[in-house]
Amino acid sequence: MPRILYFDLDGTVVQRGFGHVKPRLADGRLEDAVRAAGFERLVCVANMCTIVSTLLDMGRDDVDGPVWIFQLCQGAFRDLKWFHSVTTLIRDGTTRARFIDFGGDWWWVDDRATYYLDSSELMRRAEGNPPRVLIPTSEGDGADVIEWLEAIARTAARTKR
């Protein structure tokens, strides 16, 4: 079962309002932490995915969603070839929680996750150490995201022993 990271952009990877990349995630540090935590697939759940889907539905064949997301991450990821090979986009960012495979090895980082996870049952399933859902500080520097990914990596290392 692949380990999947569902991730948002605005307020999660970059400062709210599509500002700059959060400093602690810059220069490929988010990619390094994601890889160290053993994620095999990335799924972008941002509202930008809806725009990409709409453009593709309109017949725009020049739209490459993973490349757009990579660029919007402003250096948080450095290896475009790897990113493109492991990343998919959901169709509709406004209903992002319904795209998560809660039966798999899922993890979700999104500053607005509680807005999309309206079920207390789903939030209970997200509990753990580390929790399956991280709600980062939208204006933070990204340290909370790195610490969470490092905790996932430590847990994965312990279970492999």
Image: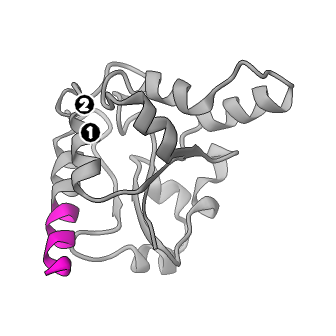
Where residue 69 appears, as percent x and y from the top left, is 50, 30
Residue with the mark numbered 1: 30
Between 97 and 115, the one nearer to me in the picture: 97
Residue at left offset 34%, top offset 53%: 135
Q: Is residue 11 magenta?
A: no
Residue 49: name its quadrant: top right
Q: Contact, CB < 8 Å: mark 1 with mark 2?
A: yes
Q: What secondary structure is the stretch in magenta mostly built from?
A: helix
Q: Residue at x 36, y 39 (%)?
A: 12
Q: Does the rendering let one see residue 17?
A: no
The stretch in magenta equals 151-161
Kind of residue at disc 2: Gly
Check the image and report above or below for 77 versus 38: above
Q: Position of residue 152 (x, y in %)?
A: 22, 64
Q: Which residue is mark 2?
A: 28
**Residue 53, relative to residue 37: is it above or below?**
above
- The answer to whether residue 106 is left or right of residue 50 is left
Is residue 52 visible in the rendered image? The answer is yes
Residue 155: in magenta span: yes
Q: Residue at x 44, y 32 (%)?
A: 81
